[in-house]
Image (cartoon, coloured by chain):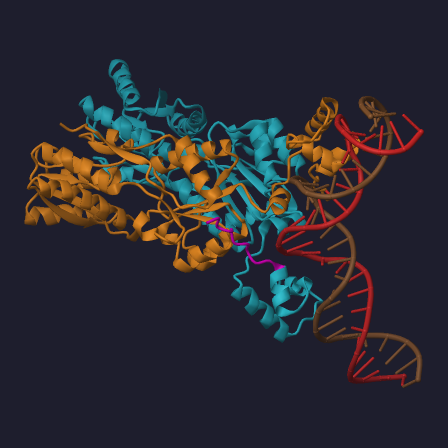
Chain colours: A orange, B cyan, C red, D brown
DNA sequence: TAACTTAGATTAATCGAATAACCGGCGCCG
DNA sequence: CGGCGCCGGTTATTCGATTAATCTAAGTTA
């Protein structure tokens, strides 16, 4: 039995059934652009037939004719996205849909540069939103030349000046400030900061570190960075190092997850937390609530998704650069 | 300055520049379907000009003409996807790309049923892969009528018999078996199992519970379920309840994250883990390595992504039903 | 009654790529 | 010398939707 794949209904099908031309049907279904005169009777008939046939407009055909798509292509980072990113994407998807756009995610590891840009460009999205490590200069060029707006995630506005590339950032330095202020206020003088060794995370880690330093050193507290991998062994190594060189009073653990691993290693070494070493994470994930002691953390709160969506869509439509940084740090105290 | 949005190069542009017709260009760039005779010299010229102009085929135009897309639309669940799901999607994206398909994710909460199906169908994807709670019967119908293959995630093969809908499942019962076997073998007789109260997770929780029960009761061990929300308070409530009714010997915590919250509550109540109550999670996330004691867990190992991709693509191309369940449970012992 | 308006449509071109059908010229063979 | 085959292409149509331009019949006005 060769199953004949059903052919979706088209404008022509509707037109034939109603007994009018496809033009009329198109006008009706697009709510008659100004100046068109179509009596309510016709409109009703067209709409009911469209419904009956389960008509769904063919996005490709439409975009081919109009020369633009309603697609916003979000290229995912290699790293696993936490709840913060997931929530952002979900919210944004909803918001841009209200503005007539469709946000989709596309993610394949090790797919970057010109080759990747070409495959993104093939979909002719209105914009590509991609993490910095996926975008090369040549790749960005391919997109720009195809008339596609580019958002670089994790690229500072200064870096993208004059390139026509918009940016979307998290204020990691501000996050560092918030963590630093908390620790300094509570009298800690010898503060350590974890910095992930992975390429992508290292950049963010260093920015958080910078923010922490700015606040701490201003108040006469010392900050020492410690590189760490995303493994329990690496956490143990860090702690072992400290046991030799002297334990810090407090640790800013980059994020909740790195902090969690470190906490395990500290407890294994018999270090009392937070009495001997205080620990601050970031992102306010549920991990904070699983650990004992619970983790003090810095949550990044996102401004309304609707507002972010409007900024993005505005930039896309005018093809003007914008630089967004919609998250602000908020301290969540859990350890004394 | 009104920036004229650059127009991407088309077949016509290449044809004009090379001095041949668009047909020739098309044949060359698609590697001359059998029977076509085009000398190497022409091929080379066409290809070099295409390259020079940065030509990227217009996916919409192509799909309009061919009547099919290379799109596989993965509709994301409302819940935050863990590393397991993320890894699956990344791997699959890569694998299907090798087979000429493009997997994209689309996620907006509270977007389900017929309305959602219509918006998915608009893209004319070759297939829609969606979690069960996004698919209504009517919605599935819209897709099937549009000639789109449907994969229901989390729907048992029996449920989808005769509907033409393929399924993609995780063997939660098997996971329960593995956890149960471990606990029974270690002599635990009074086993509790957490079951999430959230709609979507409850289904999986109950399947895991069923598997656990099958093994345990076969060996004369008792299993008592305990409903829990994804909050620290709820975990505390569960523990409080047990303190009244009697603590179990062991707990299967649904997954690592629920187990983590429960562990916190147990420790708060002064219960020694694993001496008084043993705890088993699931998914083998890094959370297991942060907690003290570390968590014994059941990891779901996925068979090769290439193989899964082939099954999916095969079903899509033939429009035949398949029922996939590519994960198998593996115990990871960490608590004695 | 002729000229003009207007409501309510229709016609036809177009977007970019794929592809079936066709075509002119050259060489070879009987 | 006529016919056949093959080489290296070209022409023209098609996919589904949009939209500017046009058309028709009825009604209005002078």
Res A323 quadrant in image: top left
Look at the image and say whether residue B130 sits in the magenta stretch: no
Determine the residue positioned at 49% across, 42% down: A317
Q: Is residue A54 visible?
A: no
Image x and y of residue A154, in percent:
33, 47
Above or below, comparing residue A272 to residue A140 in the picture? above
| Dominant secondary structure (helix, strand or loop) of the stretch shown in magenta | loop
Image x and y of residue A14, in percent:
74, 33
Determine the residue positioned at 44% across, 42% down: A315
Q: Quadrant of the C terminus of chain B?
A: top left
Q: Considering depth in this image, is B9 or B248 the residue closer to the camera?
A: B9
Left or right: A7, with A126 as reference point:
right
Q: Is residue A62 visible?
A: yes
Look at the image and say whether residue B2 sits in the magenta stretch: yes
Counting every numbered tag in the picture gives 0
Above or below, comparing residue A204 to residue B161 in the picture? below
Res A290 quadrant in image: top left
The residue sitting at the top extreme is B244
- Range of residues picked out in magenta: B1-11
Q: Considering depth in this image, is B282 or A139 the residue closer to the camera?
A: A139
Left or right: A189, with A293 as reference point:
left
């Amino acid at each position: 039995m060769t199953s004949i794949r059903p052919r979706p209904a088209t404008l022509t099908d509707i037109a034939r059934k109603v007994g009018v031309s496809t033009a009329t049907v198109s006008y009706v279904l697009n709510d008659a652009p100004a100046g068109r005169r179509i009596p309510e009777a016709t409109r009703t008939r067209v709409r009911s037939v469209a419904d009956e046939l389960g008509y769904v407009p063919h996005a490709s055909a439409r975009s081919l004719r109009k020369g633009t798509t309603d697609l916003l292509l979000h290229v995912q980072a290699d790293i696993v996205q936490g709840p913060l990113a997931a929530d952002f994407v979900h919210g944004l998807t909803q918001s841009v849909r209200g503005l007539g756009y469709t946000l989709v995610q596309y993610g394949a590891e090790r797919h970057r540069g010109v080759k990747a840009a070409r495959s993104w460009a093939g979909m002719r999205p209105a914009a590509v939103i991609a993490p910095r490590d996926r975008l090369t200069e040549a790749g960005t060029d391919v997109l720009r030349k195809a008339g596609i707006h580019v958002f670089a995630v994790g690229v500072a506005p200064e870096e993208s000046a004059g390139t026509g590339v918009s940016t979307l950032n998290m204020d990691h330095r501000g996050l560092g400030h918030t963590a630093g202020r908390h620790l300094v206020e509570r009298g800690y003088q010898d503060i350590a900061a974890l910095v992930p060794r992975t390429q992508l995370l290292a950049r963010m880690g260093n920015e958080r570190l910078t923010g922490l330093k700015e606040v701490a050193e201003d108040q006469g507290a010392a900050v020492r960075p410690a590189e760490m991998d995303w493994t329990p062994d690496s956490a143990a190594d860090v702690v072992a190092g400290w046991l030799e060189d002297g334990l810090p009073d407090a640790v800013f653990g980059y994020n909740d997850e790195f902090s969690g691993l470190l906490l395990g290693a500290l407890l294994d070494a018999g270090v009392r937390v937070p009495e001997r070493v205080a620990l601050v994470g970031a992102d306010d994930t549920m991990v904070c609530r699983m650990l004992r002691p619970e983790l003090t953390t810095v949550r990044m709160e996102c401004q309304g998704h609707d507002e972010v969506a409007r900024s993005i869509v505005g930039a896309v439509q005018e093809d003007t650069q914008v630089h967004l940084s919609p998250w602000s740090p908020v301290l969540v105290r859990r350890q004394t």
